[in-house]
């Protein structure tokens, strides 16, 4: 799953566990930040595009580091006029680690806890359900879904 977010006047394509460098955001290292300007969310099934943003969608990130970028030298000169000016600039930046992409209405995932092992007797009873689950209806919202629905009817 991936998302396109907007922060600091720029757009970034992000996925879980990505490290991105953005313009300075408020927050100490280790703090959690929600980026709420999500322009698009996509996965293997398809994409959801906002107009201009997706309502309720957000990207959860953790601040890794607050630092300053490389120095940029600004040099101005006008020939034969004895005009030379040299300046430097270092932009404040924030390094973020993307932790989760949450679609509209989704909630944050809790920290993964190790699952307790079930006894063998419980596993066997869970493996044989009493009734078979009903077939899922095909998603007909896309062209792929329509083609799959026609094939399943035949």
Image (spheres, rainbow, N blue to C red):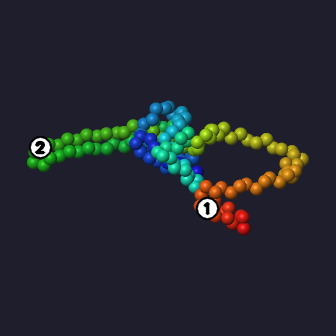
Disc 1 and disc 2 in contact, CB within 8 angstroms:
no
Q: Is residue 121 above or below residue 35?
A: below
Relative height, residue 41 to residue 152 (above, below): above
Residue found farthest to the left: 80
Pointer 1 or 2: first along the chain: 2
Element type at mark 2: loop
Residue bearing the label numbered 2: 82
In the image, which is nearer the foreground, mark 1 or mark 2?
Answer: 1
Mark 1, other Cα within 10 Å: few <14 / some 14–19 / many ≥20 = few
Residue 99 shows up from this direction: no
In the shown orientation, is residue 152 left or right of residue 146?
A: right
x 59%, y 61%: residue: 143
Q: Quadrant of residue 144?
A: bottom right
Q: Residue furthest right?
A: 121
Residue at 46% over, 47% down: 12
Q: SS for tag 1?
A: helix
In terms of depth relative to the viewer, which is nearer, 12 or 144? Answer: 144
Residue 66 x %, y %: 45, 36
Is residue 140 visible in the rendered image? The answer is yes
Q: Position of residue 5 (x, y in %)?
A: 48, 45
- Residues packed near mark 2 inside 10 Å, few (<14), some (14 to 19) or many (20 plus): few
- Answer with left or right where residue 129 lies relative to residue 144: right
Residue at (13% x, 49% y) in the render = 79
Residue 30 in percent (x, y) is at 54, 34
Q: Nearer the viewer, residue 25 or 104?
A: 104
Give coordinates of residue 131: x percent, y percent: 85, 52
What separation in Å lies between label 1 and label 2 (alpha carbons)?
A: 68 Å
In the rendered structure, find residue 73 and report the number of the disc placed on it.
Answer: none
Position of the C terminus, as image quadrant, is bottom right
Residue at the spot of label 1? 144
Most foreground residue, 17 or 152 = 152
Q: Is residue 115 left or right of residue 141?
A: right
């Amino acid at each position: 799953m991936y998302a396109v977010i907007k922060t600091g006047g720029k757009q970034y394509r992000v996925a879980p566990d990505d490290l991105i460098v953005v313009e300075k955001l408020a927050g100490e290292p280790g703090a959690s930040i929600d980026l709420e300007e999500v322009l698009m969310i996509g996965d293997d099934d398809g994409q959801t595009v906002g107009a201009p943003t997706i309502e309720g969608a957000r990207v959860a990130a953790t601040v890794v580091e607050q630092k300053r970028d490389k120095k940029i030298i600004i040099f101005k000169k006008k020939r034969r006029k004895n005009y030379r000016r040299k300046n430097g600039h270092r932009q404040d930046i924030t390094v973020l680690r993307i932790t989760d992409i949450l679609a509209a209405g989704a909630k944050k995932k809790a920290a993964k806890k190790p699952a307790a092992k079930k006894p063998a007797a419980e596993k066997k009873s869970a493996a044989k359900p009493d009734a078979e689950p009903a077939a899922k209806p095909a998603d007909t919202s896309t062209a792929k879904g329509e083609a799959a629905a026609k094939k399943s009817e035949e």
